[in-house]
Amino acid sequence: MSANKKVRNAKKTVVDGINFKSKLEAICYKILIDNGFYPEYENKKFVLFKGFKLRKDFHVYMPRNSKRSRAHELMEEYSKNILPITYKPDFYLNVNDKNVFIEVKGKPNDSYPLKKKMYFCAMNEGTDEAYFFEPHNEAQMNQLVSILKTL
């Protein structure tokens, strides 16, 4: 899986001293605050896949990682550790002892669909009651608030 690509057209925005990665995240934050909810921004990190070291007798050959085209490079032995795959939802709230996670999405990057499935699998195996919301626009954010008020 490639590294997360920057989402196109996302404009970093600062609200209440918080550096949001997009205007849409900032709008969601303001809607939540205006409705009496106090979200924490990107403070929960989930390890979806643990990293590991390659065995000494497992040999991996591939072109060296460079910014140039790999088409003309010779392969070399890969000896780096395999990094973990992690996921941080945009917002976390505790509403009446229920865990609420919110992922604001304009246009998802290339890794998000897979990470979302892995996250759902991890949460499904847990025992705590949890809610996940993925609003894509202001109307869906308002619907999210309406649902939160019923919890």
Image: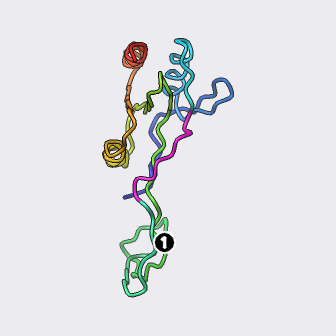
Going by the image, does 105 lie left or right of 90?
left
Region rendered in magenta: 41-49
Figure check: 117 above or below 140: below
Q: Nearer the viewer, residue 90 or 9?
A: 90
Whether residue 60 appears in magenta in the rendering, the answer is no
Q: How many numbered discs?
A: 1
Query: Is 52 situated above or below 23?
Result: below
> Furthest residue to the right?
17
What scheme was used to colour the molecule?
A: rainbow
Q: Residue furthest bottom?
A: 57
Q: What crowding class fits label 1: few (fewer than 14 Cα within 10 Å), some (14-19), or many (20 or more)?
A: few
Q: Position of residue 23 (x, y in %)?
A: 52, 26
Q: Residue at x 41, y 81 (%)?
A: 55
Q: Which residue is mark 1?
A: 81
Where residue 109 sits: x, y (%)?
A: 39, 43
Q: Secondary structure at mark 1?
A: loop
* Residue 1 on image: x %, y %: 36, 58
Looking at the rendered structure, the kind of residue marked 1 is: Asn
Task: Name the residue rendered at 39%, 32% in the picture.
Answer: 130
Residue at 45% over, 53% down: 47
Height in image: 66 above or below 15? Answer: below
Residue 99 image-quadrant placement: top left
57 with respect to 89 (left or right): left
- Residue at 55% over, 13% down: 36
Q: Identify the image quadrant of residue 144.
A: top left
Q: Measured from the top left, where is residue 30 in percent x and y?
A: 55, 18
Q: Quadrant of the C terminus?
A: top left
